[in-house]
Image (cartoon, helix red, strand yellow):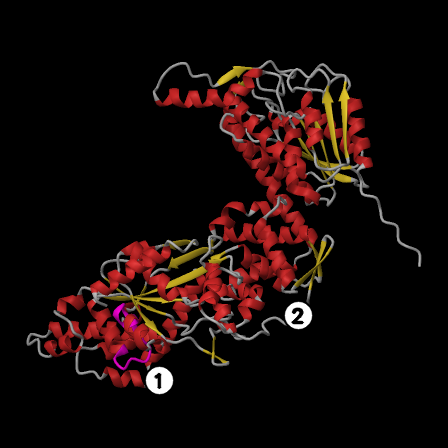
Amino acid sequence: MGSFAFKATKWTLDLATKLIKADVRMHNHETIQDDMAIVFVVNHFTRIETVLIPYEIHRHTGLEVWSLAHASLFMGRIGAYLRSTGNLSTQDPDRDKIIVSSLLAGRNPWIIFPEGAMIKDKKVVGPTGDYEIYSGGTRRPPHKGAAVLALRAEFYRHKLRCLAARPSKEGIQEVLDKFQLTSIEEALDKRTVIIPVNVTYYPLRARDNFLVRAARSLFEGLSPRAIEELSVEGTILSSESDVDITLGEPIDVNDYLNTPSFAPVLACGEGDFEALEKDTRSLFNDTARDMTRRYMRDIYALTTINYDHIFSTIIRFQKHRKFKERSYRNRIFLCIHLLRNMNRFRMHSLLETTYRNIIYEDYSPKFHNFIDLCIRENWVQKDEDTYRKNFELQRGQFQFHSIRMEEITYVIANEVEPLPDLLNLIKEIARAPRARLSEEIREIFLKEDRRIYREDYEEYCIPTSPPARLGAPYLLKPKLPVRAGVVLVHGYLACPGEVRSLANYLRSNGYFVYGVRLRGHGTSPEDLAHRSWEDWYESLNRGYTVIKSLTDKIVLGGFSTGGALALLAAGRKGNKIQSVFAINAPLHLRRFSARLAPSIVSMNSLLKRVKSQGIVEYVPNRPENIHLNYSGNPIRGVRELGRAMAVMEKELHKIEVPTLLLQGSNDPIVDPSSSQQIFDLVGTARKEMTLLERDRHGIVNGPGSRDLFERIHQFLLRSEPKKRRKAKI
C-alpha cells in the first residue's frame, strides 16, 4: 500500500467515523509487540469489518493493516482503489508470495477472515461440534489459509537463519530477491504470530435506518438482499449500538514448528517445502488444520457476552411451554451471576453494571425490547402476565440471506454456540425447577446482605452504635397459611430494629417480613456520610429479592425515609407488587436547615480543597429512641435524603397498586402537608390517606402504635386481589 493512498484512506475513514454513532471499543491491543509479524484472524458477520477493523487497529496502534478481499470486488475503479489501499484479491496469482514476503519483512500485518464469507446466521458449529461454515448451500470447514501462510512465513524465516549461519552465505541473495527483502536481518528480527480477533455487536437488530433510506433515495429497485444488509449494518452503526473488538493472545507459530515432528523438515539443508505443502496428508497440512481449530476456538472465546445472548439461550433451552416473567427474570439473573463468578467470559459493560435490575424488576428497556422482539418473531406469545413458548415454530428455516430480517433471535443464540461451558450452565438453569432457583437466589441475597452489614459494622462501629442485633436485617417467617410478603424499611438515622414491632405483628397475621437495613444505618454517622440514596435503594431491592423468592404476593412498606423509598420502588416496579404503604413519608421537612444541606456539602468540599477551617460535617440529633437512632446527623446524609425525596416525587404518578398513606398530624420532623401532596401525585385511584392525631415522629413505636398496625393490616386485607369465580357451564 502506498503511503499517500493509506493516508488518503485514513482521512476518508476519519471523516466516515464521525457519521458512525455506535460506541466502538477495542480491547487488549496492548498485546501487539514490535517484533511481531502479524496475521489477524477475524470473525465475519457484516461488510463493516473489512473497513472498521483495519481502521481501529491503525487508530490504536499506528499499524498500516492490509487485508484479503473477495475477488468479486476487484472490478474497475473500485478494484483499483482496493489494491491501492492494501487489499489483495483472494484469486490474485501472487497472493501467497505477497503475503509471505510481507510477513517475513514484518512490513504490514494482514487481516484474514477464516470463515471466508459473511456468516449471516452466525451458525459456525455443526452437529458433531466441529466448526462448519455455510457456503453455496452446503456447510464446509473454515479455511486454513491463514495458518498455511503463517507457517510458510515462519518456515522460510527459519531457512534464512540456516543460510545466515553458513560461512559462505550462499543462496542468501536469491532468497532476498524472491521475497523482496532488503537485508536478512529484516526477517530475522521478527516472529510470525496469529492474533485472533472477535467482533461482537450489541444489540443486533435489522430495521429501517439512515443507510436504507439513503440507498432508496439514490437507487431504484433495491434487491431484497441489499435491503437486508443495509438494514443490519445501518442499525449496527447507530447510536443505539455497541461494537466490541477484542484481540486475543497471540499464537506463536514457532510453537507449532519447534516440535520433534518438524525437526527433519526444519533441518538446515536442501528442503523442498513446496512439495511438502502440496501433500494434503502431510504433517504441514495437519498442523495447519490444528492451528485453524485453535484460532477458531479463540475467536469465539472472545465473544462479548451480552443480555441478548442470555435472553435467547434461556428460551432456546427451556422445556416449559408457559413461563412467568418473574421466573424468566430469575433465570436470567442467576445465569449472569454464575457466569461472572466463573470469570471465564468477556461480559458486556452494560450487563456488568445493570444486570441486577433484571431481578429487582424495575423497568428494563433491554429486557422488554428483547421480549417484544420474540413476540414479533412468534417465538413467544403473551397471555396477560404469562408467556408461552412456541414449540411448533421451526427455527432456522429462513433463507441464509434473509434470516437476519426474519429470525434475529435465532442468529443471536447461535453466536454463543461455540462456548460449551456457557451453554451447559444456561441449559441447566433454563431447565431447573422454579423452587430450586428461588432457593438459590434467596441464599445469595441473604448471605450478601448479612455480609455487608457485618463488614460495615466491623469497620464503623463506635461505642454509641446500636447493638448489632438491632441493626442487622432480618427475615421473619409466619405460620401457614401465608397471605403475602412485606418488604419493610426503617427511617433515616435509625435501623431495622425501629420497625421490628410492626414486623412481628405482620408475621403473626400470616406475612413473610424482611426488615431492610439501609446502607449506612445501624453502624455510625460516619458510615452514613459515605452512602448515597442509591445505596439505600439497593438495600431495599436486596430485601425485595428475598421476599419475592418466597411469594409472588409482595407488599412494600416503610416508615419515614423508608416510606419514601417504598413509594419510589412502587412507582418503578409497577404491577410486580400487590400494594404499598408509607408512614410519615417525607416530601418536605419541618427544619429549614435541611434545605441548606446541598450548599453546606459544596462549601465543605471547597474548604477541604483549600485546607481551611470551618467545615461542618455533622449536626447534633436528639433521637426519640437513643438505642435505635444516631445522635449525630451527617450533612451529606441530609443531602441524600433530599435527593431521595425528589426522585420519589417523580415516580409517584407511576404507582398503579393500592396505596396507603399514614401521617401524624403534629409530626415535628416531616411536614404533615407531605402526605396530602404525595396522595395527590400517586397515580392509582385505589389510594387511601389517614391523618392520625400524633405529636411524635416515631409513631411506629410507643402509644398508639397498635392502632397503626391494625390500620395497615386492614388495608392489606382490602388490597388483596379478588379471587376469580369460575363461570358455570
Left or right: where 189 falls relative to 296: left
Residue type for callout 1 = Thr
Q: Nearer the viewer, residue 399 or 722?
A: 399
The label nearer to you, 1 versus 2, is 2
Q: Is residue 666 above or below residue 714?
A: above
Name which residue lies at 38% across and 14% down: 613
> Which mark is first along the chain, 2 or 1?
1
- Quadrant in the picture for residue 641: top right
Q: Quadrant of residue 260?
A: bottom left
Mark 1 = which residue?
280
Residue 159 counted in the magenta span: no
The residue segment tinted magenta is 82-95
Q: Is residue 728 above or below residue 47?
A: above
The secondary element bearing badge 2 is classed as: loop
Which quadrant, please, contains the N terminus?
A: bottom left
Q: Quadrant of residue 44?
A: bottom left
Magenta-colored stretch includes residue 90 = yes
Q: Residue at x 73, y 44 (%)?
A: 551
Q: Dot 2 corresponds to which residue?
A: 393
Locate residue 63 relative to residue 120 in the image: left or right.
left
Estimate the x, y position of residue 134 in percent, counting from the top left: 48, 76
Gap between marks 1 and 2 measured at Cα:
43 Å
| Residue 476 x %, y % | 71, 35
State the image coordinates of residue 210 (x, y, percent, origin top left): 47, 59
Task: Report helix, strand or loop for mark 1.
Answer: loop
